[in-house]
Image (cartoon, coloured by chain):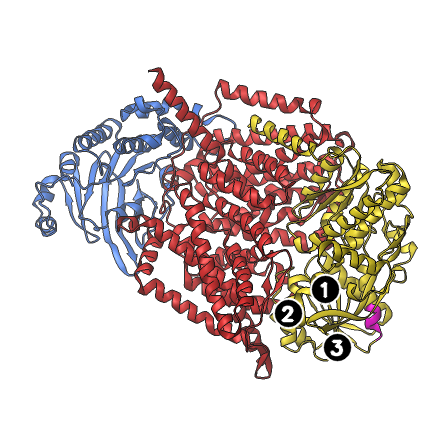
Amino acid sequence: MAFFLAQILTGLANAAALFLVASGLSLIFGVTRIVNFAHGSFYMLGAFVGVTLMDILPGHVGFWGAILLTGLAVGLIGAFVEIVVLRPVYRAPELFQLVATFGVILVIQDLALMIWGAEDRLGPRAPGLRGVWRIFGEPVPKYDIVLIAITPVILFALWYLITRTRMGTLVRAATQDREMVGALGVNQAWLFTGVFALGSALAGLGGALQLPKGGADLLMDFNIIGSVFVVVVIGGMGSLPGAFIAAVIISVLNVFGVAYLPQSTLVLMYVVMAVVLIVRPYGLLGREEVAGEHGQVGAPERPIRPYGARGRMVVIALLAALALLPLVADKFILTLMIDVIVFALFAASLHFILGSGGLVSFGHAAFFGGGAYAAALLVFHTDTPMELAFIAAPFAAGLLALGIGWFCIRLSGVYFAMLTLAFSQLVWSLAFQWRSVTRGDDGLVNIWPADWLNATAPFYYFTLAMGVGGILFLRHIIHAPFGYALRAGRDSPRQAEAMGINVKRVQFAAFAVAGAMAGLAGGIFVFSKGSVFPTELEIAASFDVLIVVFLGGVKTLAGGVVGAAFLTGVEDWLTRLEYWRLILGLLIIAVVIIAPEGIVGSLRTLWVRIRHIEEEEAK
Amino acid sequence: MTEILRVENLKKSYNGFLAVNGVSFSVQKGELKALIGPNGAGKSTCFNMLMGQLKPTAGEVFLDGERITGMAPRKVWRRGVGRTFQITGTYQSMSVVENVQMALISHHHRTFAILPRAWRLYRDEAMGFLDTVGMTDQADRPCSVLAYGDLKKLELAIALAHRPRLLLMDEPTAGMAPSARIDLMQLTADIVRDQGVSVLFTEHDMDVVFAHAHHIMVLNRGELIADGNAEQVRNNPHVQEVYLGGGTLFKEASHA
Amino acid sequence: MKLLRTALLAATAAMTALPALADSIKIGEINHYKRLAAFAEPYKKGIELALSEINGAGGVMGKDLEFIFRDDQGDPAEAVKIAEDLMTREGTVMITGSILSHVGLAISSFANEKGYVYLAAEPLADSLVWSSGNPYTYRLRASTWVQAAMLAEEAAKTDAIKYATIAPNYAYGQDAVAAFKANLKRLKPEVEFVAEQWPALFKIDAGAEAQAIERAKPDAIYNVTFGTDLAKFVREGGDRGLFDGRKVYGLLTGEPEYLDPLGDEAPEGWFVTGYPWYDLPEGPGADFVAAYQDATGETPKIGSLVGYMTAQSIAAALTRAGATDSESIRAAFEDLTIEDTPIGTLHYRALDNQSNMGAYVGTLAVKDGKGVMVDWEYKAPAPYMPTDEEIMAMRPAE
């Protein structure tokens, strides 16, 4: 019994930092609707700033003062980021801002490395709180007890701020209805800045508060972001009490997982999230997202048209150039182009459901990696000929998408996204932990193409045929009734249902098609690299492809392909430089600000404007 | 005359609050019938239960004798019920004619087709429906640039596309200029007359209602307080009380 | 789009044309310079120190030896692409690099397929030279199996029977636990493992792990956690008295990369593998430490040592080969012997392409507010290896 109590105390102590960071993210999302990937970075900044301040400021006052100052400092940094990076892109399509926050992650990573160096910092101990108290004979670290005591205080302070102050009233109003706040004559921009700063400050506080239990290191940002999103989603996006309950549930369950199911550490929280979302699609205390409630911001999409004569000529010329490339380019250019085509197909498959269907998937890598693994497993274990194993890739990925889609498609918006993320994590953990079959993160190696393809040029042509074929297939579907039905369900699900379209079934089918096409890309990928590792199933892989789709332009047909080509090319070039993450991050932010419709969308707008001017002048 | 729609004792409660409390009525074939009532009377709730957007707490809905209570909207549509919305729901990313083509594609069970090009399918047929509502000249404009009144007309064309037996129109003239309202209702009346469609509609504009509706029902606080022709309803003391009590001049109802 | 692509490729070509020095031999070095900066930076500095010495002494075959450092973001697929770039465009003659085992395995498989030589310096996975071994892949560091066996040997000398293990939940951690168990069981069949804890890498819930181990009441603990996980585990375990009266065996715990950040909280009494650079006797080992501190102003990490010996190994192989084609270099690595490296004579055996670099083992103590290894000794790997027959059975047929 005492042990049980001690376990719960450990869980509650762990919940403290998690709640702080998660409450900040939840606040930011609730008011600004920004899915802030960079939230983990503010947590990391909090840890580093905290360590630095604690070194300078001595004693009790120094320690606690440093924590408060850290919150303030990180809040200011958050405000700066909001004003410089996010404010210009609030009018961009929904969720576009997450690309900007991704850029912020990269910038902060390199800046932190420049400022604090590479070595891990052990956090200072809280003065006077070293050691343990015995509770029923069980040792409980003193600082744990302090954390457990602090959390409700912070929850209360936040509750007071939200329910008893004018800023809180505005925040609540904005959470319910953004337009209304504008109507009340409140400067929405500064409200957003304020909320973003507060959210960042909470993350910074979390980073500083956990110091005596850990420290500061350069991997903290990515290491916490997964659990923070899980907590926010389980609690219900935008709900502070929800975040608190979820932080406690996750932390306590984790402690029991460690004790009774030690292998569960990788996936436990994702399993919990999946179960919660399947039972309660909007989290524990979340509110249903009413369709269209937040409005489609940004310019409406124009009707799609197949390329006219000129466009077709460009595409044919491009394909001809690609086909002739092996005659002029060296081997590495071909290798790079294989990467580009594979990534472009992968991006096109996500773009298909994201652009036409409005389904934002945070777990699309599950199908890319799933296809790659399916082919690799066949080759590795049964010596299946390459041709056959390759064909298995899209089928296996399509089946996987059917399975995952069956659960996810009932949800919508951010909750759909998070459930796909949870499932992709399950797939990842399967590849990671089922070593007897997948070899875990030792990966499956020596998966090379059949002899007739096993040279750069033949494999390049193979990739070109499959990749371009897949992309054209997806484009064709977009122009077919199925693609139209998918867009109908996105534009107005109500109207679509009222005209006999089974929106969910259309989305389900589209999800499977997208999965199969991602699997096709994965199939090409595994034979081009000769190996596959769980890395391909990681959250980071899903985010990469999401970023390029947004970067290329969601509301355009070529967006995914162009975004993929852009990022692959730029990355290949930049990673040769010392501070490439900083440059890449700034570049992404610049693109986001200059081209809020994505690269293709903004180029098109520019083109239309130029033609418009020409026509005017002609008159 | 035979009835196309029969509603029996329909109820909807939200957390104990009865938004619609035991409403029963029927719509005859070829009839243009209006459902009116002050704000919050439960008109939209009632409408949303007819086509399945909302599930009733109690009561039954029959379409031509078949029970359709709580049936999904798309299934009700398949049985020949079209609908327009108070706040229009058109496909912003498609052209005007493509919006109608989409309805035809669904009507012909080709939603899942991946081979043909969608904009080539049923274009002529769709142009015919646009012609009915007088929008052929705007057929290839993006839907997103249409004026509000045109969106209403487009929705009507969409609703007509599968040749419905019954048309449910929720505030068809809301937000339109007065002259446009008359035009749209005249158009609707013509359709009822020419194509034998039955129409049930809700409306704020009393001029529109009394000028065109064959029969009028009045809903107040979730209960039906009158059901009859214009004269009967106008002279119903209960109705007068509701509208006068609500501060709105009944007979000279404004266009608000 | 085409224009963009062309522009990019042109820019890429222009960039790579710049550093081409006509009279140098280039080596491709692929690593996770950003993702694992704490480990990759000292490693790179070790290489640079060796290069300055080698080139100062006339280089290799009369030419300067040059490393081209590239960042793979810790992604195996990216690493493979860079390897291709390096070998086909940058004119490198062989590949080295990677800290993460799975990236090393990806490069190794690729190198074998294309016939490029790959020296895996840091990756510890046994499979690199055994079950996934191939003729083109050589490895410098002592593998997981060997280091775990050294700890198991020490553990078998005590009367501890009940063991708990804690290791990060991925291939390296699982191999390390399996190797320790196999070796300890062989030496002392009566031991039993009462708890196996598998925290997620760098996401340890240290308090809960400490509680779970305590609950199993083991006589001794085998620790494979490292980095921030180790710091948290040591803190929580120390506070809760988990290590009181228990012998702890820590794989890699004594390496400066992990020990230095712990400061005065380094867990005293643990028996660990590591790198006691501060305590080396006069000779090439101490000379290296002095030279490194002179050159960088920093104390060496074990990565520094590995980086230094990597460059030494490659220079020696190239000198022996007398040519820069892959086949000659590969052949030169076979049974390559290098005198006077910081660990003495280094030898790459032909059997499995593994070097004879061993490991330092000793007991942790705190001196002047820092963790150090005391009573340490350097152990050669040979006694801890499986038999030649066993290794041949594991290696795929060539």
> Mark 1 near mark 3, Cβ–Cβ under 8 Å?
no
* Nearest to N terminus: mark 1 or mark 3: 3
Magenta-highlighted residues: C152-157
Most extreme residue toward the bottom is A136
Chain C in the picture: what colour?
Answer: yellow
Q: Considering depth in this image, is C36 or B161 the residue closer to the camera?
A: C36
Badge 2 sits on which subunit? C
Q: Amino acid at mark 3?
A: Asp
- In the picture, which chain is red? A
Q: Considering depth in this image, is A110 or A375 the residue closer to the camera?
A: A110
Name the spot of residue C24 as percent of width and height, x first: 79, 37
Residue C154 forms part of the magenta stretch: yes
Q: Nearer the viewer, mark 1 or mark 2?
A: 1
Q: Considering depth in this image, is A30 or A50 the residue closer to the camera?
A: A50
- In the picture, which chain is blue? B
| Element carrying mark 1 | loop
Residue shown at 45%/28% (left/top)?
A: A604
Question: Residue tagged by mark 1?
Answer: C224
Badge 3 sits on which subunit? C
